[in-house]
């Protein structure tokens, strides 16, 4: 399948998704509750699994004009270098319910911890789909066995995870409507829900709701922005400044900075 310029290692290994692992040259993960194995072959992606090209292209945002995006966000020499160094890094268009649930669990947790919690949730509430992999449960599946959440090692997130599923199930949160909102209205709506603060709202908006101007800020990004761009202050101030500087594709800039900081730390 051809999905455009995409580097699987950079895209699937940079912290925006939590259900992918690499074994040899293959990445194995779950897209729309289908187990998929992917391997890059030249300009194509070799695929094992029951997924059509349209679904794969949507997931990897093949409709994004990556050349235009990197031109627009290359506001300075540092970013210009990053987009060359990490060519093929793309944002992923995730399922909004799964993305929102995952990032509500991600508060104050390392990536391995997040991955473990999500795996526990899938094994407890989902169903086996293939090869030991489990579906990501729908809200109603969680509510059928609320006590099961206590066995998922979610810690303080347990109660609010179940409550989030309850509110989604009763349509308190309309993901399609959030996609149509202006960015600021979208994140304010998300923040009405327990466990969704500024960063989590920005992650959900960026990774699943097509608000590409969102600029999530964690400790790593905060330090990088202070060092590279002399930005400081509250989350709101730093996020607004980053959006104003990088423009409508600020979320892509954030991901280039994130992967750069992550790789530099790993190689230190």
Image (cartoon, rainbow, N blue to C red):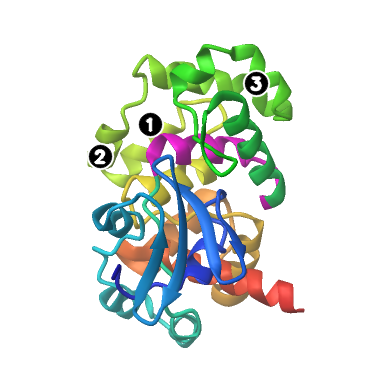
Check the image and report above or below for 205 versus 73. above
Q: Earlier in the sequence, mark 3 or mark 1?
A: 3
User: At numbered mark 2, what does the secondary structure look like: helix, strand or loop?
Assistant: loop
Q: Is residue 174 left or right of residue 117?
A: left
Quadrant where the image shows the C terminus: bottom right
Is residue 24 within the magenta segment? no
Is residue 102 within the magenta segment? yes
Q: CA distance from mark 3 to mark 2?
A: 32 Å
Residue at 49% from the left image edge and 71% from the top image edge: 256
Mark 3, residue position: 149
Mark 1, residue position: 189
Q: Which mark is residue 21?
A: none
User: At numbered mark 3, what does the secondary structure look like: helix, strand or loop?
Assistant: helix
Residue 91's quadrant in the figure?
bottom left
User: At numbered mark 1, what does the secondary structure look like: helix, strand or loop?
Assistant: helix
Q: CA distance from mark 1 to mark 2?
A: 10 Å
Residue at 65% from the left image edge and 74% from the top image edge: 263
Q: CA distance from mark 3 to mark 1?
A: 26 Å
């Amino acid at each position: 399948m051809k999905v455009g310029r995409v580097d699987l290692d950079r895209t699937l290994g940079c912290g925006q998704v939590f259900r992918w692992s690499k074994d040899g040259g293959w990445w194995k993960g779950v897209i729309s509750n289908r187990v998929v194995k992917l391997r890059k072959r030249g300009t194509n992606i070799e695929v094992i699994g029951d997924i059509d090209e349209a679904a794969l292209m949507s997931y990897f945002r093949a409709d994004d004009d990556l050349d235009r995006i990197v031109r627009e966000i290359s506001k300075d020499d540092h970013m210009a270098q990053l987009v060359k160094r990490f060519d093929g890094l793309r944002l992923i268009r995730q399922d909004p319910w799964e993305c929102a649930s995952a990032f509500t669990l991600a508060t104050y947790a390392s990536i391995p911890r997040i991955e473990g919690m999500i795996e526990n949730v899938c094994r407890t509430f989902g169903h086996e789909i293939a090869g030991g992999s489990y579906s990501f449960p729908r809200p109603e599946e969680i509510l059928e066995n609320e006590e099961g959440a206590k066995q998922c090692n979610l810690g303080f997130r347990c109660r609010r995870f179940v409550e989030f599923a309850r509110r989604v199930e009763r349509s308190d949160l309309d993901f399609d409507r959030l996609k149509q909102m202006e960015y600021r209205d979208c994140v304010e709506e998300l923040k009405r829900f327990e466990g969704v603060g500024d960063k989590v709202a920005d992650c959900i908006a960026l990774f699943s709701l097509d608000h590409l101007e969102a600029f999530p800020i964690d400790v790593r990004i905060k330090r990088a922005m202070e060092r590279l761009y002399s930005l400081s202050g509250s989350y709101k101030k730093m996020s607004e400044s980053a959006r104003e500087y990088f423009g409508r594709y600020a979320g892509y800039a954030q991901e280039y900075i994130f992967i750069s900081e992550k790789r530099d730390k790993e190689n230190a």
